Image (cartoon, rainbow, N blue to C red):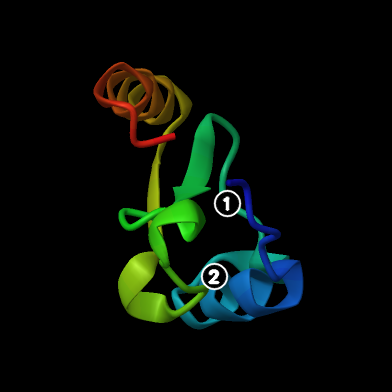
Amino acid sequence: MKRKRNQAKIKKILKKRGYPKGKVPQGKEAHHPKSKAEGGKDIPSNIRVISKRKHIIIHKRRRKRGKI
C-alpha cells in the first residue's frame, strides 16, 4: 500500500542537513530506508540522500522480494 509523503517535513529535514531550499542536488533523491508502506515515517533517521541509480536498484530489489 502506497502512503503519501509529507513533503514539507522532508524539505525541513533536508534544509537541516545542509541542502539549500530543501532540495537535493541533481542526480540525487531522498530515500526512506523503511518504506512508508512498511510503517516508515518522515523523520530524520528514516531519510537518506542517495543517487538516483542506487534508488532505482533498491526499489527494484524490494519489488522482487514483494516488499512494495
Q: Amino acid at mark 1?
A: Val
Q: Are marks 1 and 2 in contact (CB under 8 Å)?
A: yes
Q: Which residue is mark 1?
A: 24
Q: Nearer the viewer, residue 61 or 22?
A: 61
Find residue 16 and report its horizontal and vertical position in percent. Answer: 50, 83
x 37%, y 18%: residue: 60
x 33%, y 26%: residue: 54
Alpha carbon distance from label 1 to label 2: 7 Å
Q: Label for residue 10?
A: none
Q: Amino acid at mark 2?
A: Leu
Query: Which secondary structure lies at badge 2?
Result: helix
Disc 1 crowd rating (10 Å Cα; few below 14, some 14-19, many 20+) is some
Q: Which residue is mark 2?
A: 14
Residue 8 located left or right of residue 11 = right
Q: Nearer the viewer, residue 20 or 48?
A: 48
Find residue 55 and report its horizontal and vertical position in percent. Answer: 40, 31
